[in-house]
Image (cartoon, rainbow, N blue to C red):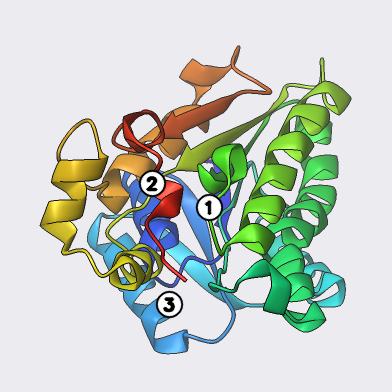
Amino acid sequence: MKGRSALVTGASRGLGRAIAVELASQGAFVFINYRKRGEEAKETLRLVRETGGDGVIIRADVSDPSQVDEMFDTIRRHTGGVDILVNNAGWGMISPLDSMEDRLWERHIAVNLNSVFYCTRRAVPYMIEKGWGRIVNVTSIAGLKGVKWLSAYSAAKAGVIGFTRAAAQDLAHTGVTVNAVAAGFARTDMGLSFFKATGIPLEEFARRFTLTGSILEPIEVARLVAFLASDEASNITGQVYVIDSGMSLATDYTSLIEG
């Protein structure tokens, strides 16, 4: 990836941080996007530089199209554009369907789905002009199967899958590929909050509700994203790769949260 530039949204922590560091370790110059965790974004940049790579921190709420425009204006001044876009920014909050407020539904759609469109729309002209580009959208097994009390999150992540498949067709024969990674629950702040909601200890959860007996580590997702962003994945597009410790096959985990 030497000579490539990459934007990772929501890269201040969790999966985004791991992805940014992995891409940097393979030679990419990384734009580290964050919305409100500035100190954590600085830590991501420190880790990026620790690999021998480099990058720039950019603050922007990617659910706001005007802020996305400003972010890409900044990127243009640095590198002209991005060769690799990882739409990772995500947010979820548990809420029963019958008591969900409009603002909560709208926030889930804005952060998890609208942001993917806004960033992709700005990224693709540069990629098309160069004849090479990689877009990797981080979705969730919730978008494939649905999770109780996460109807808004599940709907948004399902939308990302549909968008991925449609965008891959729109960008056919341009040298730009579009794929998605459907992650299971990982050892991140968001993932751990789900485990806490179930009331089941993490080790017991892994033993009972996965096929591997272990929970995803962020680096595992990052390595899959990096592969899809590489030259070696040039003939992979419009696909959704599930990485979830076999959880979606192991059991009906969606009933774990009790009302």
Q: Which residue is tagged 1? A: 147
Q: Quadrant of residue 51?
A: bottom left
Identify the amino acid type marked 2.
Answer: Tyr
| Residue carrying label 3 | 41
Q: Which residue is mark 2?
A: 253
Q: For this rendering, which residue is in front, 171 or 106?
A: 106
Callout 2: SS: helix
Query: Residue 79: horizontal and vertical position, in percent?
Result: 66, 55
Mark sitting on residue 119? none
Residue at 88% over, 27% down: 170
Measuring 58% from the left and 17% from the top, which residue is drawn there? 234
Q: Is residue 71 visible?
A: no
Vertical position of residue 258 compared to residue 102: above or below: above
Location of residue 237 with respect to 46 vertically, above or below: above
Q: Earlier in the sequence, mark 2 or mark 1?
A: 1
Residue density around tag 3, few if under 14, some if 14–19, many if 20 or more, within 10 Å: many
Picture residue at 66% right of the left edge, 49% below the top: 82
Q: Are marks 2 and 1 in contact (CB under 8 Å)?
A: yes
Q: Amino acid at mark 3?
A: Ala
Image spot of residue 216 (x, y percent): 27, 46
**Spatial CA span between label 2 and label 1:** 8 Å
